[in-house]
């Protein structure tokens, strides 16, 4: 998978460079800036994962967020996802680490989905653009959707 | 000096965590060293996967012509408008809250409201580089199941939100876009 990713990115970079040097440089600058923007959070979460996984046993994580935690675990994961503001490039390493330490696919799917689509903290900002009603309905239906994704993961994974 | 201070401030939480970990090494060596081991393993993994993802992010952001696409997302744009809205969101870079100001621009230029919700939905969950990242971390099957469901979910959320709003409330959203701009 990682090899495909590199082939894909380098191929795109080459085509871009052949078409326009300036635009390619701009794209690389944007790429660096986007990375630099998440770096404080990314580096922090990596240390948190390290500390948490050193202290917590796989059994404890599994009890909280494992497949045996059932809908309680799914709901907990979806709520954490709805409240926190974690960029996706940071969330996937976290989810993968939790998966390896005993968390379940359903629970992680609920966390990832609600993290991406629901933003309780940013509802005021969303309200500025769409009004309170639209913002609330969008977030609520997105939250329900993340539970549906969890359900589907339970069926298919 | 001011720059160092600003950097320190941005990384203060990280610095605090590293300090905690170092203290752990002295207080409880086995846990502290285990923790550092896990962290380094994850750093290595992240640094392997992230460069191509962000290069794609930058390229998509630079090459996708927003201005031209927005022109074809109006009230009578039909399926073309839907696909453009979807692609525009999927090719973007940045967190969801960065999508709202751009949604404001779309509304200002007369994009259909449902297309703007589709754009928000795509921005939040079907960004192309993130799908690749998800597949490499969580497995291709997991990523594909979530992608297929997200397509259905974006349609459902768009439909629900738009149907819940009255004509007045929809007009109000367009008025807000003018003010917020």
Image (cartoon, rainbow, N blue to C red):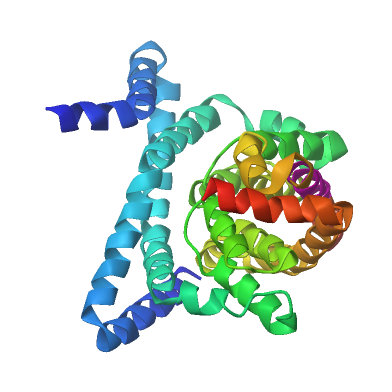
Residue found at x 64% / y 48%: B176
- Residue A127 position, x and y percent, is 67, 41
Q: Nearer the viewer, residue B40 or A27?
A: A27
Q: Quadrant of residue A74?
A: top right
Q: Nearer the viewer, residue A31 or B166?
A: B166
Residue B97 appears in view: no
Residue lying at 53% horizontally and 28% vertically, measured from the top left: A52
Is residue B73 something that shows in the picture? yes
Question: Which residue sits at x=62%, y=29%?
Answer: A57
Image quarter (top left, top right, bottom left or bottom right) of the N terminus of chain B: top left
Most extreme residue toward the top, as rendered?
B27
- Residue B66 location in percent, x, y? 48, 72
- Residue A149 position by quadrant: bottom right
Q: Residue at x 36, y 21 (%)?
A: B16
Q: At which x and y percent is residue B15?
A: 32, 25
* Residue A137 percent location from the top left of the image: 81, 46
Q: Give yes or no for residue A10 being in the magenta stretch.
A: no
Which image quadrant is residue A101 in?
top right
Which residue appears farthest toward the left when viewing the image?
Answer: B1
* Closer to the camera in the image, B134 or B129: B129
Q: How many marks?
A: 0
Tell me where the magenta segment starts and ends, as one range: A135-147
In this orientation, which residue lies closer to the viewer: B25 or B100? Answer: B100
In the figure, is residue B65 to the left or right of A151?
A: left
Is residue B164 toward the left or the right of residue B123 in the image? right
The secondary structure making up most of the magenta span is helix
Residue A139 located within the stretch drawn in magenta: yes
């Amino acid at each position: 998978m990682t090899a495909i990713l590199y082939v894909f990115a380098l191929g795109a970079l080459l085509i871009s460079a052949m078409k326009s040097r300036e635009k390619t440089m701009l794209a690389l600058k944007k790429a660096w800036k986007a990375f630099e923007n998440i770096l404080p959070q990314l580096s922090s979460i990596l240390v948190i994962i390290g500390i948490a996984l050193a202290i917590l046993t796989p059994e404890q994580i599994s009890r909280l967020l494992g497949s045996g935690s059932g809908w309680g675990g799914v709901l907990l994961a979806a709520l954490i996802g709805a409240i926190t503001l974690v960029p996706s490039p940071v969330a996937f390493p976290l989810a993968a680490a939790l998966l390896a330490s005993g968390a379940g696919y359903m629970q992680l799917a609920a966390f990832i989905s609600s993290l991406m689509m629901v933003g309780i903290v940013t509802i005021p900002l969303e309200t500025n653009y769409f009004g309170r009603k639209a913002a609330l309905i969008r977030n609520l239906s997105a939250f329900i959707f993340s539970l549906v994704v969890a359900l589907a993961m339970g069926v298919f994974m | 000096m001011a720059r160092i201070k600003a950097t320190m401030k941005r990384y203060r939480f990280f610095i605090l965590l590293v300090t905690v970990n170092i203290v752990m090494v002295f207080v409880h060596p086995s846990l502290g060293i285990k923790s550092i081991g896990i962290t380094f393993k994850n750093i290595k993994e992240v640094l392997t996967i992230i460069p191509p993802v962000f290069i794609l992010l930058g390229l998509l952001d630079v090459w996708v012509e927003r201005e031209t696409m927005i022109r074809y997302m109006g009230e009578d744009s039909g399926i073309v408008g839907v696909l453009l809205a979807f692609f525009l969101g999927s090719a973007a870079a940045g967190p969801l809250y960065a999508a709202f100001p751009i949604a404001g621009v779309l509304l200002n230029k007369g994009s259909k409201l449902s297309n703007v919700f589709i754009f928000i939905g795509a921005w939040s969950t079907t960004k192309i580089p993130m799908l690749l990242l998800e597949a490499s971390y969580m497995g291709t099957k997991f990523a594909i199941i979530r992608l297929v469901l997200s397509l259905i979910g974006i349609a459902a959320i768009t439909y629900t939100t738009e149907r819940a709003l009255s004509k007045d409330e929809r007009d109000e959203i367009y008025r807000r876009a003018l003010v917020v701009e």
